[in-house]
Image (spheres, rainbow, N blue to C red):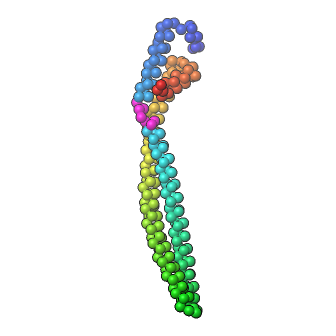
Amino acid sequence: MAKKDPADYTVEEKLKTLYELQTILSQIDSIKILRGELPLEVKDLEDEIVGLGTRVENINNDIKSIRENMVTFREEMEQAKRSIEKYTEDQNNVRNNREFDLLNKEIEYNRLVIEHDEKKINDAKRQEQQKNEELERTAAALEERSKDLEMKKAELVQQYLQPIFFLCNYLLYIVRLPLYKVIIVVLFRLQPKREV
C-alpha cells in the first residue's frame, strides 16, 4: 500500500491518527513518570564509584608512601648502627677524656636515633595495617556499588528503553510515521522539562 499524501487524508483519518499519536505521547509520559528517579540514581552511583575508585587509589598511594618511609627509617637505623660500631672502635684509640666523652655522646645519640626509628617503624606498621583495612572496606564498597550500578542500569533499560523501542516501532509500522518524525516526537517528549 502506497503512502497517501497528508493533504489527501480525510478529516476522520487525520483525527484517528492524531488520537493515536496523542495516546502514544501519553504512554511516553507515563514511562517518564515510571522511571522516576532511576536515571538520577544511576548517575549518583556512577559518581560514587568514581569517588570510591579515587579513594582506593589514594589509599594505595598512602600505603606506598608508608612503605617508603619504613625503608628510609631502616636505612637510618643501619647507618646509626654502623656509626656506633665505628665510634666504639675509636674509643679504644682515644688520647684523652675529652675525645672519649665526645665519642660516648655520639654513641648515645646514635642509640637514640635507633630507638626513635624503631618507634617510627612500629607506627608506620600500624598505619599500614589501618590503611590495608580501610582499603579492604573501600574495595568491598566499590564492588558492591558496581553491582548495584549494573542492576540499576538493567532496570533502567527494562523499565525505560524497551517500552520506548516498542512505541517507536508502533509509530513506524502502525501509524506509519516517517522515521525522522518518530525520532523527533520521541526525543522531544523525553527531554527533561526546563524551568524558566
Q: Is residue 102 above or below residue 45?
A: below
User: Which stretch did the figure color magenta?
Assistant: 34-40
Residue at coordinates 44% horizontally, 25% vertically from top-left? 29
Q: Looking at the image, can residue 15 be seen?
A: yes
161 horizontally vs 180: left or right: left
Number of residue marks: 0
Could you say which quadrant of the image residue 136 lies in? bottom left
Q: Is residue 133 above or below residue 39?
A: below
Q: Position of residue 4 (x, y in %)?
A: 57, 11
Magenta highlight on residue 23: no
User: In this orientation, which residue lies closer to the viewer: 63 or 160?
Assistant: 63
Residue at coordinates 43% horizontally, 57% vertically from top-left? 134
Q: Looking at the image, can residue 107 be seen?
A: no
Q: Quadrant of the N terminus?
A: top right
User: In this orientation, which residue lies closer to the viewer: 81 or 5?
Assistant: 81
Q: Position of residue 74 (x, y in %)?
A: 53, 73
Q: Position of residue 83 (x, y in %)?
A: 56, 81
Q: Is residue 122 above or below residue 153?
A: below
Q: Main secondary structure of the magenta part?
A: helix
Could you say which quadrant of the image residue 103 lies in? bottom right
Residue at coordinates 40% horizontally, 30% vertically from top-left? 34
Q: Is residue 162 above or below residue 88?
A: above
Q: Position of residue 45 (x, y in %)?
A: 45, 43
